[in-house]
Image (cartoon, rainbow, N blue to C red):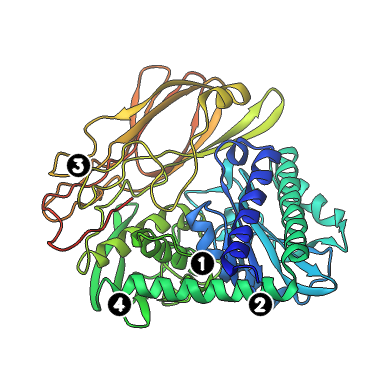
Amino acid sequence: MTSWEIIYKASEFIAEEMGVMLKRSAMSPNIRERMDHSCAITDAEGNIVAQAEHIPVHLGSFSIGVKNTLNLIGELEEGDMVILNDPYISGTHLNDVMVLAPVYYNGKLVGYVVNKAHHVDVGGPMPGSLNPYATTIYEEGFVIPPVRLMRKGQINNEIVDIIKQNFKVPEVSIGDLNAQISANLNGIARIKQMFDKYRYDNVLSAWNTSMEYGKKLGLSEISKWGNGVGEDEDYLEIGDELKKIRLKIKIDEDGIYADFTGTDTQIEGPLNAVYGVTFSAVSFAIRSLIGKDIATNEGFYSLIKVNAPKGTIVNPNKPGAVGGGNVETSQRIADVTFKALSHLISVPAAGSGTMMNVMMGGIYKGKYWAYYETIGGGTGARPNKDGVSGVQVNMTNTLNTPIEIAERYYPLMFTMYRIREGSGGNGKYKGGDGIIRAFKVLEKTRLSIMAERFKVPPWGLKGGESGKPGKVTIIRSNGIKEEMPSKFSTILNKDDEVIIETPGGGDIILLMRIGEDHNYF
């Protein structure tokens, strides 16, 4: 009989191959160059069997999003494919278009393939569909509930036409959507081949065993931390106010319980995080502290229970705006999870704590254009070594947009791209440095920024210094310099320059406790 691990690894590689096809087939630089997409395979009940190592904020939300969708959409036939982006169902934000398809083998439903891809613009008033001023999701973009994109292998052109009329760069959006369809079709074909090779009963048994093993090994690793309770808080910057995210985290023989009671109520702004994002961020922090290679599937996720009270920043009521919750609040939830755990075990100091989202758009050469990217920063110092400079931190796992690509397709000219030296502090173990990235616009452009850690810098541990906060400066073509807040939208005119400085990570002063031998990252 074939080892269950061989079948599990084959399933992981199918998810990875789906991601490769999606990336190579996509039209937008955001997916093709930055790899802002994720893929997974589930069993017939929607439990995660295997996922590719893609975007952390996507991955933890798949189980929630798939099960929500299946509960709403009903039975799917072979050849059907579902599309949605409603954050309160899919578990992230409107830009993350989710495409789900059933996998049938010899007439029997055996599972599902699913992917999410961040579309650079899904409608709404702002380029990039991340609106710093949104108070509801309807001011962020076009909401798609679960609907059949394909029926029995045939594209539903009515749905495609609706997308074309509401997404602001339709030729790019449809290209990316076709890539998502192709990725799922490839996944379905590969899973069927796997069933042919290893036989029906063996594959299903291996999937169940891999989930049981993921739970068993995850529990074994977490038990090494010892039982206990850690509690702490961190803050989001909402205008002139700070909003609190409070977490009490308990470790016991059953796993981990994360309780966000005491977190501030949801806001009339875009930094609310739907439950899927909150679960993703907590599970990411826990998974990253486990040193061993374990199966990150439903077995592992079942060890983590999250209580996020309804109507709070970490589990808002619809139709609260949530675009920034996915990209910024997710970072703060990861930070506060690390911070609460720091009272129990050794963890890294805070990383840059922001995805530093840059959205631009306008009319160029007679056509509308939209641009989106996130800019990396410094990771926090580790208990036994320095942090890393100039990388995407925590809940993002994307790449930068190459300057050559951006300048080729958009009216931009980059003037600076370098490490922000000294932004990571000067402790025993130093936080990584952030990034300075600057550009001029060559045509009139709408610019929006959505970021964090401008007022509350990334914290250090054990007496370590904080990293330097973020900063955005606009130098107008007439020489006037404007220091900008962490969230804004403005019009840039030709030759205006934008200088973005991302935060460095926090420091750690003291050595790790005697007897601990964690090798972080």
Density class for disc 4 (Cα within 10 Å; few <14, some 14-19, many ≥20) is: many
Of the two numbered discs 4 and 2 on the same chain, state the one appearing first in sequence: 2
Q: Which residue is mark 4?
A: 251
Q: Secondary structure at mark 4?
A: strand
Check disc 1 and report the residue beneath it.
Answer: 276
The relative height of residue 278 versus residue 402 in the rendered view (above or below) is below
Structural distance between the alpha carbons of marks 1 and 4: 21 Å
Q: Residue at x 53, y 60 (%)?
A: 59
Q: Is residue 15 left or right of residue 158?
A: left
Q: Which badge, 4 or 3, comes first in the chain's sequence?
A: 4
Q: Name the residue type under label 1.
A: Gly
Please identify the residue farthest to the bottom as the structure is shown: 253
Q: Residues within 10 Å of mark 3 (few under 14, many from 20)?
A: many
Please report whichever mark, 1 or 2, sits nearer to the chain's N-terminal start: 2
In three-dimensional space, the C-alpha distance between marks 1 and 3, rounded to whole angstroms, equals 33 Å
Amino acid type, label 3 = Lys
Q: Which residue is mark 3?
A: 430
Asked which secondary structure carries label 1, the reply is helix
Q: Are marks 1 and 3 in contact (CB under 8 Å)?
A: no
Relative to 352, is 197 on the left or the right? right
Percent across and percent down for residue 215 are 46, 75
- 396 in relation to 334, above or below: above
Q: Amino acid at mark 2?
A: Glu
Front residue of 116/270: it is 116
Residue type (three-letter) at the residue carrying disc 4: Ile
Tell which tag, 1 or 3, sits nearer the viewer.
3
Q: In this figure, which residue is indicated by the disc labeled 2? A: 45
Local SS, label 3: loop
